[in-house]
Amino acid sequence: MKTVISVRDLEDMVRNGKDVRSLSDDVILTPSAKDFLRDFKGNGKSAPAVVVAESNSPYVGGEHLAPPPAKLNSKSPKSELESFFNSPYAHHLKEQICEMGHRLWKRAYVDGNGGNMAIRVGEDIAICTPTLVSKGSLKPEDMCLVDFEGNQLCGTKKRTSEILMHLQMMKRQPKAIATCHCHPPYATAFAVAGIAPPTCMLPEYEVFCSVGVAPYRTPGSADMGKLVAELTDQFNTILMANHGVVTWSHNNIEEAYWRMEIIEAYCRTIVVAGQLGKPINTFTGPQMKELLNIKQSLGFVDPRFGMKECELCDSGEWRPGAACATPETPAIGPDAEAEAVVKAVTDQIMSRLK
């Protein structure tokens, strides 16, 4: 199996003084790694700037969320929880949630006060968005701290009513650092139809998203959270039937948000492509296998890992496009009454002719 090299691998090589130009020809570079290497070669011997997370910053770019400065859980003293909740570390996370909320609102992925997000910050505690607040106007002071049973530990505004779903996802999937839920129109249309989008059409979607469908239950209910959480072992993007989409990330809240952009753009693209009147081009088995190798190297989940190449692009019955058909006109059988009238009239005519 070929080795997959990510941009993080190249950055590690630069930090350790290794020459990234010495890579063998048989490695697979992720798209961002190719950009990194191109910039590196374009600068001659000067390596591009490598961003290193500062110890007091919980997040830089697309990097993994730095651990909290202290290990806390729901049983920690109230004073320690409040101190953490008001710390610079927690404030950074609150700002990130606000930024993602503003992006969701600007892209019309949320309406009214819809949508919610959460970030795991301890063994069984998370920072989350409040209820009844538009994502377009979120502020750091609006955030809440909750335990994994949904009890609010800190914050002046009431936590989101759908927090149980986020918490059940985190309990079921230990890798889940951050979760994001909203209602992007095209992806939600697939959720309303109860079907996952077909696969093997765009690389970004295949690498960053793996999509499952959860049946409808009342939003905010424990049953809804349970059905969604059961899918997190294999999927990082879940369509909630007749409701919306929820994503999770093992890195940070921005990556969870990115998945919303990716699935929405993908769903919109294939709907439009299906209206062009041309056959849709799809990846071959080997092409799809290569993308899944990249995906696995990035630590993402996908139920297709380990499947044969010939099985990778089986998307079920749905394909882009619309088929119009006129219902067949049911066959009309003989009308006995009409037949009797015709016979009577015929008999009278024949009688007069005689």
Image (spheres, grey):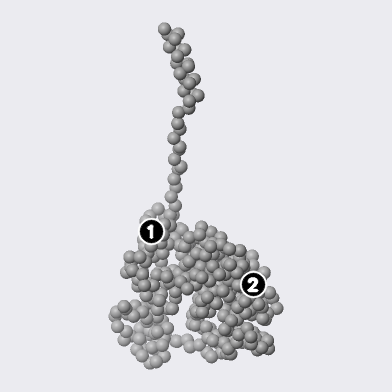
Q: Do the residues labelled 2 and 1 touch (CB within 8 Å)?
A: no
Image spot of residue 79 (x, y percent): 68, 88
- Residue 62 shows in the view: yes
* Residue indicated by mark 2: 160
Residue 20: mark: none
Q: For marks 2 and 1, give the one nearer the viewer.
A: 2
- Residue at 43% x, 11% y is 350
- Residue 95 shows in the view: no
Image quadrant in which you'd find residue 134: bottom right
Image quadrant in which you'd find residue 21: bottom left
Q: How far apart are marks 2 and 1 (CA)?
A: 41 Å
Q: The residue under label 1 is which amino acid type?
A: Ile
Quadrant (top left, top right, bottom left, bottom right) of the C terminus: top left
Image quadrant in which you'd find residue 77: bottom right
Image spot of residue 279 (x, y percent): 37, 56
* Residue indicated by mark 1: 280
Q: Is mark 1 on a helix, strand or loop?
A: loop
Q: Which of 252 and 37 is in front in this view?
A: 252
Residue 150 shown left or right of residue 337 in the figure: right
Q: The residue under label 2 is which amino acid type?
A: Thr
Disc 2 packing (10 Å; few <14; some 14–19; many ≥20): many
Mark 2 or mark 1: which comes first in sequence? Answer: 2
Query: Furthest residue to the top?
Result: 354
Disc 1 packing (10 Å; few <14; some 14–19; many ≥20): few
